[in-house]
Amino acid sequence: MTTEVIRVLLVDDETGFTDVLRKRLGKRGLDILTAVGGTTAIQILRKNDFDVAILDLKMEDMDGIEVLKIFKKMDPDMPVIMLTGHGSEKAAKEGVEYGAFDYLLKPCDLEELLEKIHQAVNH
């Protein structure tokens, strides 16, 4: 039995955060492509297919909810996991209403994130 490599689009405007997460998830055998901000993420999604997207709720260029809505129009079947800082749980729940698979609070535990990614892909 061959297991497909899970392709992840990681969207956050904090490059330090995406760099660290890309390396850590990459070591776990995931194929990670990062986008700094929503506009870049949308451009990347136009040209690539992903099994799951990890999307930050608060970004400089675009609101995570707006990006989520666009993602859902572009690829309705791709699960999206929202990441949110403290105090934004309400907005993250709103994201779930708009079709996000689930949300996690930042900073999130790597194992918890991996579990969510696998749940989302197998959903």
Image (spheres, rainbow, N blue to C red):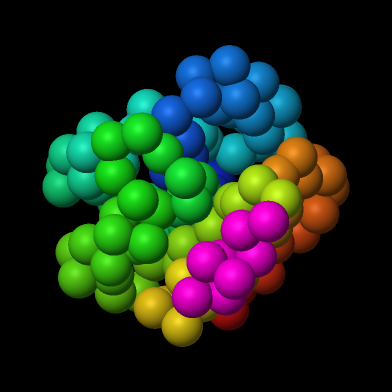
* Mark count: 0
Q: Position of residue 94 (x, y in %)?
A: 49, 75
Q: Position of residue 6 (x, y in %)?
A: 54, 49
Q: Which quadrant of the structure image shows residue 101?
A: bottom right
Q: Which residue is pictured at 50% across the width and 19% down the height?
A: 15
Q: Is residue 120 visible?
A: no
Q: In the image, 20: left or right of 43?
A: right
Q: Is residue 78 visible?
A: yes
Q: Which quadrant of the structure image shows residue 67?
A: bottom left
What is the quadrant of the C terminus in the image? bottom right
Q: Which residue is pictured at 47% across the width and 70% down the height?
A: 95
Q: In the image, 84: left or right of 74?
A: right
Q: Which residue is pictured at 41% across the width and 39% down the height?
A: 59
Q: Nearer the viewer, residue 22 or 85?
A: 85
Name the residue furthest front.
87
Q: Nearer the viewer, residue 25 or 60?
A: 60
Q: Position of residue 64 (x, y in %)?
A: 39, 53
Q: Position of residue 41 (x, y in %)?
A: 29, 40
Q: Main secondary structure of the magenta part?
A: helix
Name the residue furthest bottom.
97
Does the magenta-highlighted stretch encompass residue 74?
no
For the record, the magenta segment spans 87-94
Q: Is residue 112 above or below residue 72?
A: above
Does the magenta-highlighted stretch encompass residue 88?
yes
What is the quadrant of the N terminus in the image? bottom right
Q: Nearer the viewer, residue 48 or 79?
A: 79
Q: In the image, 76: left or right of 116?
A: left
Q: In the image, 28: left or right of 102?
A: right
Q: Which residue is pictured at 73% across the width and 35% down the height?
A: 28
Q: Is residue 84 above or below residue 79?
A: above
